[in-house]
Amino acid sequence: MLAATIIASSMVFIDGTLVNVALPALQRELLASLAAVQWVVEAYALLLAALLLVGGAAGDRFGRRRVFSIGVAIFAVASIGCALAGNVAQLIVARGAQGIGGALLVPGSLAIISASFDDDARGKAIGTWSAATALTTALGPVIGGWLIDHGSWRAAFLLNVPLAIVVLVLASRYVPESRNPDEAGPLDWAGALQVTAGLGAVVYALIEAPARGFGASRVVVGLVAGAAALIAFVFVERTAQRPMVPVQLFRSRAFAGANVLTLLLYAALGGGFFFVPLDLIQVQHYSATEAGAALLPLALLLAALSRWSGGLVERHGARLPLVAGPIVAACGFALFAVPGIGGSYWLTFFPAVVVLGLGLGVTVAPLTTTVMSAAPTDLVGAASGINNAVSRVAGLIAVAAFGVIIVPIFERSLHENLDGAGIGPAVISVLESQRDRLGAIDVPPTLGARDRTVAERAIAEAFVDGFRWVMLACAALSLAGAAGAWVTAKDVNPGTRPPGEGGTAF
């Protein structure tokens, strides 16, 4: 039973990290623009984030094993759709279907463990699940990179199929059915629709803005409609019989403050790490396997430090780790802005990966502890789900918003670099017509060796110029999170709160 939940969760977590490593390969093969590859990530993230909470409620009501198995099956079929996609539009649709499957299976994994183990064994089971999924998440980009280098990005998606078959067999034989008898009311489909529409409209507007400008009618309509839908979502949740998001949780200063830090920190992570593999593969010319392995020290540090850092709140209160950790993480992001083109990994990106890993290792476990301690006892499940959804929404918005940063800088730098490169105007026109592909611009094969080298250098330097500003924006977000924690955090152990009351860590 535990194996089924671990393997299923690992599929989703691996996919979330593996796809970023696959982006350069699929962008090259499908001739996709930056906006298109953003949607490859965003279609999945949007539906996963928007439906995660209602997916958990569906399992409680209709049967956790049933909904979990349906999610696994949808995810597997959608993965086949990704592998067989003939163009980027088909891939985006299949990725959206993967997000729906993930929203059904992810909350079911922990719910099944909680329902199947008694109090004495539950903590050990969850710890085993956490360790195993962390390990597979760390190894996912390396395994996916190897498949991409020795086969195709399509093979990386097909990896999910045999895993899903194993999960379905194990679930049918060893996972008992369970449900919450108190979960009898209607599911919050109105809230799910509102948040999906709102986030989708905002993401669409932000992705379109670099090419069309913020004054374009479709961008303005998208932003206004998205904001209206998200405001409507708040009102729907206030009146819903079984809301996805119990708004009373946000009356706790601790809970609200911790989720603001989650939003800022995970926006930096999600948005920044969308562009890191593009830099490593397209500009630094790492293989997909090398790019996946380049970030492995971060995951290992996070796993190694989590147990130690989890006790910092009890010993020192919430303020120390939730201020110091994001500051260290900001230094890590800033170090990503230092490398130019070329150089040894150990002297360029490795220091950034290690410093960022240290910052996250100090922050993540205390942040989770603070969120859970800030919620009333009867709403800890909802609190955990909301915090998970906030982290995913943060990455969703950041991937779209960071395009607004990198695209104009890249275009300006590319024009300046090509203008003084001594290349003919016809060639410059061909290169600049592909500027929406950023580092994936195809240099005409008819160019001579000298002009080809100059053109490739101009493209790489333009990407690095934009990438540096993205990393600095990530550092600013992390520092903003630290500043918020400094203002609102108090050195109080949130575990001391009486049952049913909000904590005072913030």
Image (spheres, helix red, strand yellow):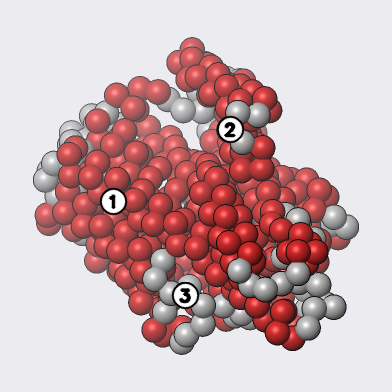
Q: Secondary structure at mark 1?
A: helix
Three-letter residue code for mark 2: Phe
Amino acid carrying mark 3 in the image: Gly
Residue 461's spot in the image, x, y percent? 55, 70
**Residue 82 image-quadrant placement:** bottom right
Residue 497 x %, y %: 17, 36
Q: Which mark is residue 340?
A: 3
Q: For the residue carrying disc 1, how many other residues have a C-alpha within 10 Å: few (<14), some (14-19), or many (20+)?
A: many
Q: Residue 324, relative to residue 46: is it above or below?
A: below
Gap between marks 3 and 2, in whole Å?
31 Å
Q: Mark 1 — residue?
A: 479
**For discs 2 and 1, the disc positioned in front in the rendered view:** 2
Q: Amino acid at mark 1?
A: Leu
Mark 2 or 1, nearer chain start: 2
Q: Could you tell me if the residues under marks 3 and 2 are in contact, i.e. CB atoms within 8 Å?
A: no
Q: Quadrant of the C terminus?
A: top left
Helix, strand or loop status at disc 3: loop
Furthest-top residue in this view: 239
Q: Which residue is mark 2?
A: 214
Q: CA distance from mark 2 to mark 1?
A: 27 Å
Kindly identify the residue that appears in the image at 51 percent across and 77 percent down: 341
Q: Is 2 rendered above or below residue 506? A: below
Q: Which type of secondary structure does the marked residue at label 2 adopt? A: loop
The residue under the point 66% across, 37% down is 212
- Earlier in the chain: of badge 3 and badge 2, it is 2
Choose between 111 and 297: the one closer to the eye. 297
